[in-house]
Image (cartoon, rainbow, N blue to C red):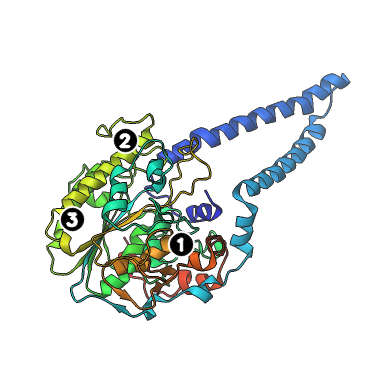
Amino acid sequence: MTFDQMILALNQPLGQAESSQIFNFLLEPLLNSLLLSSFVGSVFYFFANYAMILRTKKEMNHRKIFFPSIFLMSILILIGGISLSIKTIGYADIKAYYFEETKLYENEYVDPREVDLVFPEKKRNLIYIFLESMENSYASQDFGGVKANHLIPNLTELALNEGIQFSNTNQLGGMYQIPGANQTASAMVAQTAGLPLRASGGDLDVNTYGKKGTNFFPGAYSLGEILADEGYNQMLFIGSWAGFAGRDKYFKQHGHYEVRDVYWARDQGLIPKDYWEWWGYEDRKLFDFAKDSLTELANQAEPFNFTMLTTDTHFEDGYATEETPNRFNDQYSNVIYDSDRQVKAFLEWIKSQPFYEETTVVIVGDHLTMDRDFFDADDPNYQRTIYNVFLNSPIQPVQSKNRILTSLDLFPTTLAALGVEVKGERLALGVNLFSSEPTLAEKIGFDNLYQALMQRSDFYDQNLMQGTDEALMPEESSD
């Protein structure tokens, strides 16, 4: 986990987050720390007090020895702990986040409000599927992955033989992960607004976008807002709590999405009122329930944007059900393999629907998995990337292989995949990958882009994150 992820996580209200991570913290690092601290304290107390008494053969005032010694030891431990933490997190990242300023936004940001976007006469529908923690490394080495077992055969087939995948290699590949797009909420923002999501100013009390009654990223202008202006009906369909990390506010305030989450499913009687599995309800139900909502959108006269998010492949080890095949020796591999099968089945249903001919389907991972031990036995030098594929696109790319791309580039690229002409090929910090225009990562180098996104920016804080209150919709933000 990087430093910007930690800061963003500390800014998020916990709400109805999946509770197993909290229990894992209580039972492992916290309990271990308490036990170790108690043991060390007890040993020190003995040597600082009773051992000295036995040695001098006379009564001593233990406060003269014990408390000053404890104070000195506490200071040393505090200094050592801070030093170790900075080393573990990364001194350069902390320094960049708080003390170094970038001019990337002043030099490279293109305001989407000022870009001429030409939609086709017949507007295409959009189905945008975020797959939790889906990366290309899950494929076998024969196809460009890193695993001995081929965990995503269907997604590989889609990327290499049916759809268009933008890859960092000439095999299966994808997007490099960047700061501000390395968690689900931030990745969803980056892919739909072309901007990283970070705590404004790096202060814990500044960026309260996820709390009740506040505006979420008011300076951003996103895919949802562009499509809303063009008359699209839009829906966010997820099996978790939409309010986690302020996702509901982002999609409502940036495109008037109708949000359907675990609580909506309860209200509709799709699941029992007290049902709660994993982050809400499992993906097998999500894909099944999505069919009716997607059909509902397709039966309306206007074009639609149906955006959904899976969760079963979230760390740690994913969520396995009785239907999950026991094909491999570990649960996470089985869950990933099962997710791949479910995506294929859902896509086959989509293809059989009358609306498919006029619909572009985008399937992407949100970020790299945070499962800490899943790659222990694999090549440490392998470049892990985030999965992407565009299906049923009306245009073809100039170059799809051997590109250096990030989540920022998905914003204009998705519009292009709908047949939209993006004048200048750039929106926010993203570049249309169907064009010959180099991405920012290609233009200035990925390492330079990564470093710039780690640094603070007054332009970002004042013009994008803080913005104005004009975009705030009080009725929606009071949910």
Q: Secondary structure at mark 1?
A: loop
Q: Amino acid at mark 3?
A: Ser
Residue that label 2 marks: 320
Residue that label 1 marks: 197
Left or right of residue 448, residue 63 in this image: right
Quadrant into which the C terminus falls = bottom left
Measured as percent of width and height from the top left, residue 171 is found at 39, 51
Q: Secondary structure at mark 3?
A: helix
Labels 1 and 3 touching (C-beta < 8 A): no
Rendered view: 6 above or below 411: above
Rendered view: 185 above or below 311: below
Q: Residue at x 75, y 36 (%)?
A: 70
Rendered view: 65 above or below 250: above
Left or right of residue 217, residue 322 in this image: left
Residue that label 3 marks: 293
Mark closer to the chain start, 1 or 3: 1
Mark closer to the chain start, 2 or 3: 3
Measured as percent of width and height from the top left, residue 178 is found at 49, 58
Is any atom of residue 454 visible in this view? yes
Q: Secondary structure at mark 2?
A: loop
Q: Nearer the viewer, residue 439 or 286?
A: 439
Few, some or many residues within 10 Å of mark 1 (<14, 14–19, 20+)? many
Q: Amino acid at mark 1?
A: Leu
Rendered view: 86 above or below 466: above
Mark closer to the chain start, 1 or 2: 1
Q: Nearer the viewer, residue 226 or 469?
A: 226
Q: Residue at x 49, y 74 (%)?
A: 108
